[in-house]
Amino acid sequence: MCDKKLKINLDRLTESKAAGICESNNYKVKGVVMRHPDGDVCVVELSAVRWLEKNDWWDIMHPGIRTEREIIMGLLGAAVCPCCDGGGAYYDNNEPTQCQWCYEKDQIMNRTKDDKS
């Protein structure tokens, strides 16, 4: 729980980086970033408050870095089925048949979606 008057304890590296930025670039400390144990973040600056989920905060702090799951989903989403029109079935001797390629792609995408953390 936070006290009304915040006692801010920064780790040595964060304090050193922040002090260097303030000194060399004329920045001033005007806000605070708080992290919840689950990884969510709250930013308070000049009375404005923003609540960010941990994945959104990660995207802000690490732009352009994509997770393996995101890469797999992107590749599979763009992949074109070599067996059918992408509908998941094709006709073999006028009989509708489950497309194995589409079935496995859907299984991977659904499993990857469920594993999202």
Image (cartoon, rainbow, N blue to C red):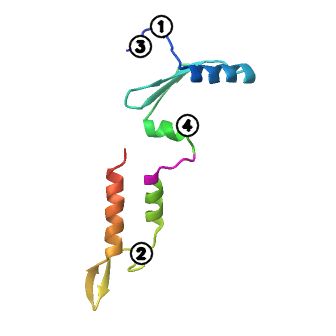
Instruction: Identify the residue position indicated by label 4 in the image.
Output: 61
Residue 111 percent coordinates (x, y): 32, 56
Give the label on residue 2, or none: 3
* Secondary element at image label 1: loop
Q: In this view, does 106 lie above or below 71?
A: below
Residue 78 percent coordinates (x, y): 48, 66
Give the distance between the C-alpha atoms of the residues marked 3 and 1, in whole angstroms. Answer: 8 Å
Residue 91 percent coordinates (x, y): 30, 86
Instruction: Identify the residue position indicated by label 2 in the image.
Output: 81
The type of residue carrying mark 3 is: Cys
Q: Residues within 10 Å of mark 3 (few under 14, many from 20)?
A: few
Query: How many marks are shown on the rendered structure?
Result: 4
Instruction: Identify the residue position indicated by label 1 in the image.
Output: 5
Whether 66 is among the magenta residues is yes
The type of residue carrying mark 4 is: Met
Q: Is residue 7 above or below residue 12?
A: above
Q: How crowded is mark 4: few (under 14 residues within 10 Å), some or many (20 or more)?
A: few
| Magenta region | 64-69
Question: Mark 1 or 4, which is nearer the eye?
Answer: 4
Give the distance between the C-alpha atoms of the residues marked 3 and 2, in whole angstroms. Answer: 55 Å
The residue drawn where x is 37% and y is 31% is 38
Q: Quadrant of the N terminus?
A: top left
Q: Is residue 89 above or below residue 78?
A: below
> Which of marks 1 and 2 precedes in the sequence?
1
Q: Is the magenta stretch mostly helix, strand or loop?
A: loop
The residue drawn where x is 60% and y is 18% is 30
> Which of marks 4 and 2 precedes in the sequence?
4
Give the distance between the C-alpha atoms of the residues marked 4 and 3, in whole angstroms. Answer: 24 Å
The type of residue carrying mark 2 is: Cys
* Direction bottom: furthest residue: 93
Residue 36, quarter of the rendered image: top left
Whether 51 is among the magenta residues is no
